Image (cartoon, rainbow, N blue to C red):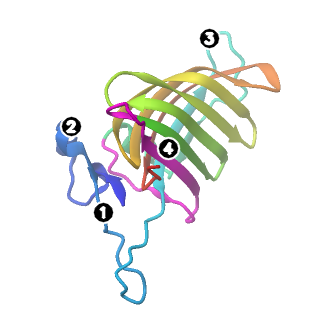
Amino acid sequence: MVALLAALPGCSSDDLANDDATVVGVAGSAGVAAGGAGTEEAPPPQGMLWLELYAPEGGSCPSTRSFEVPEGAEVDVNTTALGERVVDGVGASIECRVAPLAGAEDTFELDLELSSGSILQFRATGVIGRTAPQSVNIELATSSESLTQTGCAATARQVLPGAVWLAFSCTALVDPSAPAILCRAQSSVLFENCATE
């Protein structure tokens, strides 16, 4: 199991002030499979998402609204990341990969996907480091829009193999079938228990 320390019981927002204590990989906490053979079952991916769509000045974004998965995620994912997560197969579909990039210290390849409720698909892909600002590619599909942008500005608040806490902003999300549609977005996401290869 790979989880951010903020998700563990007993961790407070004070712990987040210490970068060395903020993230941890936890192995074997998923328990033993039925039969007691000692084989461990990998926990399912889990996460939270907050995303706000709005129109740029002079733009024509058809939908200005916020998405929170689960409900109330905006405060949690933007401050302490201590809140409730959605779990793959329980009201959400989550697939994610946070894998160390070969030959590049503290750099990770991301492929994060989530669908739940009104979000038919959220996807973030790219390469991100632990310190310097980076960029990610974003796709968002809902019942009323299908938007994409390459190169949204992103910062990893925390990242380790199998888990990432990411903030990003997009200035030009467009609908490929209707280029006149232009939206901006601010977002924070957290994905845990992801694949690492």
53 vs 30, nearest the viewer: 30
- In the drawing, what numbered circle is on residue 19? 2
- In the drawing, what numbered circle is on residue 78? none
188 vs 74, nearest the viewer: 188
**Local SS, label 4:** strand
- Pick out the residue farthest to the top: 58
Viewport quadrant of the N terminus: bottom left
Q: Residue at x 40, y 49 (%)?
A: 162
- In the drawing, what numbered circle is on residue 49? 4
Q: Residue at x 33, y 31 (%)?
A: 130
- In the drawing, what numbered circle is on residue 27? 1
Quarter occupied by residue 181:
top right
**Local SS, label 2:** helix
- Pick out the residue farthest to the front: 103
Q: CA distance from mark 3 to mark 1?
A: 48 Å
Q: CA distance from mark 2 to mark 1?
A: 20 Å
Badge 3 crowding class, 10 Å Cα cut-off, few under 14, some 14 to 19, many 20 or more, is: few
